[in-house]
């Protein structure tokens, strides 16, 4: 184990490892579990999935703690860094359980215990999985199309004056309109609701990406272009080797800006026209007044969108690794 | 016969007040094949502007520049240009940067050996896979030099490539340029405001005066190579140049 590796880990996981915090975080989960088992409920909830969840959480913490202590330095730093956060999570789980299910301070039907949300997810697992997959497919297709359109337009607008002159004023006016405003029209004009949804999400994505890309292209140092001319690059090579990599940091800013918009538009468009998807599921929950279904969908969304966000973040880190200075 | 001919070159621009401003005025000189020429003068005398015109990055309002009889209108791989600093692509590794020109010219199966050769000559082994912002300024400039040299240019234009380097690194890069010039006999034009650098490297020194930039004098510098920076002839040449430049 080199010192340099330790230094890198220290920078990333800066909270010191300590036995106390690790033990306390495991203890907090145990307390949450014992509390759920012993305190009598005021609501009738199947606590099975919640208890399994707590057990899994506890064993995970124990596992990470043991692996970190005896086998892997990286895991040790990781578990040390997040021990305090895990402790707070254990405490919060305990508190919410007491406030909702046990004492009924935050009462049904609007406030639902986490135990009941998990039970709802278990109960509706197949439908939720189907909804999640169909939402994911819709989002992925639309987001990729929207991003590609945004990047291509951004490069053309940023690099070519004539193209910019003739199209940017029009595109700006179209781009600034909230995509949702087109909704009544798209639902009628498109042959099926899937295409209408794709169109709406693409509409919400392309503009932020295009706008940031233009800025990115225009902020590339003139020296990089001049060097390219003296190195014999043709226009195609300039786009490939100077414009795209040079604008990439801004392109990612645009992608992250439009990410939130795309999630919003995904849910809204599914609520209006769709027969599948998480947005539809929420709308259905609303019509039956089953709020634990609503919370279940929200939890799934939080998971799904966090994973997408993390993945794009990873892609960005990899694509822009040249920006890191000394390692 | 003259290899490079600069004839009546004048470059004018509009300044911020909307006035026509002459940057360089009626420049005439020529360079023979294999020669090393330096352009020196105070800042604002149009050295860089002149170099850009020779490269084809800028076009003169009056006059013309010809290379081997052909008029220069735009940049070309036959005229290498090393910028003052920061012209390496930060998103490419040192090796990718050095290969970028030759890869465009020769295609996918470009001469990898030549790239390796220059990595070695420039002392960049071990840093091939680093990105420009992970290496020192001296290394980055050596890589920029290598990027131009792998294209085997007829003429190498050096725009104060040592200007942003510390004294130690500067001497280091000067020696590399000297070595390459000795070996390859590439015609080189160096813009600098360092008198010693000009005397150390060049066979002729073109002294410019500012507002507008004009040629004041072309000084022949025929000290034997390799030159010693502390020899009395070296110091005499420096004194002579300082007088031309009106130094106290």
Image (spheres, rainbow, N blue to C red):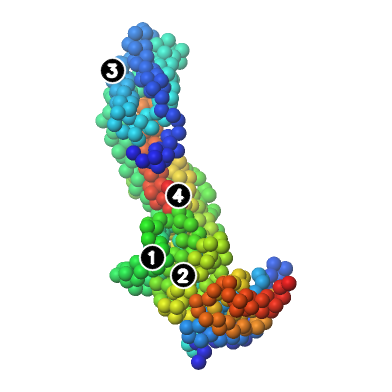
Asked whether residue A109 is in view, the answer is no
- Specify whether disc 1 shares its chain with disc 2: yes
Q: Nearer the viewer, mark 1 or mark 3?
A: 1
- Specify whether disc 2 shares its chain with disc 3: no
Mark seen at residue A213: none
Pointer 3: what residue?
Answer: A48
Residue at 43 percent across and 68 percent down: it is B146
Pointer 1: what residue?
Answer: B119
Q: Give the CA separation, mark 1 to mark 2.
A: 12 Å
Q: Give the CA separation, mark 1 to mark 3.
A: 65 Å
What crowding class fits label 4: few (fewer than 14 Cα within 10 Å), some (14-19), or many (20 or more)?
few
Disc 2 is attached to a residue of which chain? B
Residue A286, position as x, y percentages in the image: 40, 27
Q: Is residue A58 above or below residue A162?
A: above
Pointer 4: what residue?
Answer: A326
Disc 4 is attached to a residue of which chain? A
Q: SS at mark 4?
A: loop
Which one is nearer the viewer's eye here, A119 or B61?
B61
Q: Are marks 4 and 2 in contact (CB under 8 Å)?
A: no
């Amino acid at each position: 184990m080199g010192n340099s590796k330790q230094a890198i880990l220290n920078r990333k996981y800066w909270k010191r490892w300590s036995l106390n915090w690790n033990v306390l975080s495991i203890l907090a989960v145990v307390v949450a579990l014992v509390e759920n088992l012993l305190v009598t409920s005021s609501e009738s909830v199947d606590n099975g999935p919640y208890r399994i969840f707590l057990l899994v959480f506890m064993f995970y913490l124990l596992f990470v703690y043991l692996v970190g202590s005896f086998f892997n330095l990286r895991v040790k730093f990781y578990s040390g860094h997040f021990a305090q956060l895990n402790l707070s999570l254990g405490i919060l789980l305990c508190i919410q359980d007491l406030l909702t299910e046990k004492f009924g301070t935050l009462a049904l039907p609007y406030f639902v215990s986490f135990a009941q949300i998990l039970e709802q997810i278990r109960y509706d697992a197949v439908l939720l999985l189907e909804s999640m997959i169909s939402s994911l497919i819709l989002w992925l297709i639309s987001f990729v199309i929207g991003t590609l359109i945004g990047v291509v337009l951004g490069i053309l607008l940023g690099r070519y004056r004539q193209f910019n002159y003739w199209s940017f004023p029009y595109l700006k006016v179209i781009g600034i309109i909230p995509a949702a405003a087109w909704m009544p029209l798209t639902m009628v004009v498109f042959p099926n609701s899937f295409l209408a949804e794709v169109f709406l999400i693409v509409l919400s994505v392309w503009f932020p990406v295009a706008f940031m890309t233009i800025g990115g292209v225009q902020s590339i140092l003139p020296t990089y272009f001049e060097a390219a001319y003296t190195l014999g690059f043709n226009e195609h090579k300039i786009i490939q080797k100077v414009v795209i990599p040079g604008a990439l940091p801004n392109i990612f800013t645009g992608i992250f800006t439009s990410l939130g918009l795309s999630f919003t538009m995904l849910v809204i468009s599914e609520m209006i026209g769709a027969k599948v998807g998480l947005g539809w599921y929420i709308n259905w929950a609303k019509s039956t007044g089953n709020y634990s279904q609503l919370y279940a969908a929200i939890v799934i969304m939080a998971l799904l969108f966090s994973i997408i966000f993390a993945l794009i973040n990873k892609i960005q880190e990899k694509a822009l690794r040249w920006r890191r200075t000394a390692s | 016969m003259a290899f490079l001919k600069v004839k009546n070159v004048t470059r004018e621009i509009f300044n911020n007040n909307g006035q026509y401003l002459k940057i360089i005025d009626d420049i005439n000189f020529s360079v023979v094949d294999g020669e090393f020429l330096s352009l020196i003068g105070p800042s604002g005398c149009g050295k860089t502007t002149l170099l850009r015109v020779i490269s084809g990055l800028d076009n003169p309002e009056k006059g013309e520049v010809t290379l081997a009889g052909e008029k220069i209108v735009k940049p070309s791989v036959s005229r290498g240009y090393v910028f003052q600093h920061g012209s390496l692509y930060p998103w490419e590794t040192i090796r990718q940067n050095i290969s970028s020109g030759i890869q465009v010219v020769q295609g996918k199966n470009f001469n990898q050996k030549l790239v390796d050769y220059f990595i070695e000559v420039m002392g960049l082994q071990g840093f091939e896979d680093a990105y420009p912002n992970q290496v020192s300024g001296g290394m980055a400039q050596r890589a920029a030099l290598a990027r131009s040299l792998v294209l085997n240019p007829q003429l190498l234009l050096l725009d104060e490539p040592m200007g942003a380097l510390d004294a130690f690194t500067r001497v280091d890069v000067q020696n590399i340029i000297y070595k390459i010039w000795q070996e390859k006999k590439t015609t080189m034009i160096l813009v600098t405001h360092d008198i010693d650098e000009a005397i150390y490297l060049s066979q002729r020194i073109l002294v410019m005066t500012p507002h507008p930039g004009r040629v004041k004098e072309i000084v022949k510098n025929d000290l034997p190579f390799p030159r010693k920076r502390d020899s009395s002839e070296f110091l005499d040449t420096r004194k002579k140049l300082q007088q031309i430049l009106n130094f106290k």
